Image: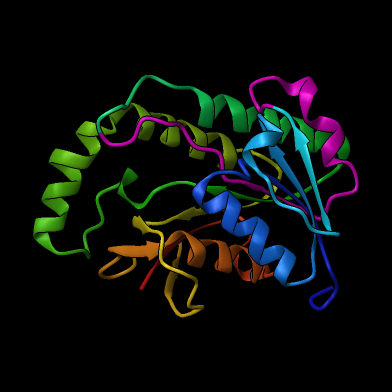
Amino acid sequence: MENQPYKLLIIGANGGIGRQCVELALDAGHRVTALVRNRANLPLKHPNLEVVQGDLLKPGTFEKYLIDKDAVVSAIGVKGGMFGDKPTTLYSEGNANLLHAMENVGVKRAFFISASAIEISPVIPRFVQFIAKYIIQKLLKYMYADLHRMEIIVKASEAKWTIIRPPQLSDQPATGHYRTAINDWLKNCLKISRADVAHFVVHNINNPAIIRTTVEIAY
């Protein structure tokens, strides 16, 4: 199956990582169903792309798009940024709904985007640990709390999941050159582009070494 095109459902397809996943998957020859809450937010056209409307917080709006898919990418995210953090259940409740729907239709493989600062890595520089603990985690406490709930839910599921924990994200183009650590801390895990997170997803859909693992990724 490695060289065959996959049928992918990419959720949050108009977000930074989601959009890159869509574009890189299409470039790689895969067939993509892009799920967004508003189709107007993803004005992409491609013969192998179907843009559909749905919301993970409303299970009846998306389950049918899971049928016959090889893998799912959940790249959902809250808006607000560093200074607009608000209580949310999008990651935990939304992905719990997704996992339930996947079980209903028999889809197993899924990727979930989390964040490296959800835990303080012991192998990043001390000043970065300080920033992560006393600034980033405090400014984004609601988002990280819900990502933490999400990870617990995902890890308890029967899915063939991979949780990806990127550090600070940039909008640089994909390079295809980055380091990863599987179920371990990645030394100097400081920065990665959204495009290279997407590159890792698209090129590891059928990689058995990362099934039911947490992956840190950085340059």
Residue pictured at 41% horizontal, 66% vertical: 172
Identify which residue, 157 or 3, lies in the foreground.
3
Residue 13, compared with residue 124, is above or below; it is above
Asked if residue 121 lies left or right of residue 170, the reply is left
Identify which residue, 212 or 1, lies in the foreground.
1
Q: Secondary structure of the magenta portion, mostly?
A: loop
Image coordinates for residue 54, horizontal then vertical, percent = 73, 29
Asked if the magenta segment contains residue 71, the reply would be yes
The magenta segment is 55-82
Residue 17, compared with residue 51, is above or below; it is below
Q: Count the numbered circles shown.
A: 0
Image coordinates for residue 28, horizontal then vertical, percent = 73, 72
Asked if the magenta segment contains residue 65, the reply would be yes
Identify which residue, 135 or 214, lies in the foreground.
135
Image coordinates for residue 198, horizontal then vertical, percent = 56, 61
Asked if residue 82 lies left or right of residue 105, the reply is left
Residue pictured at 35% horizontal, 73% vertical: 219
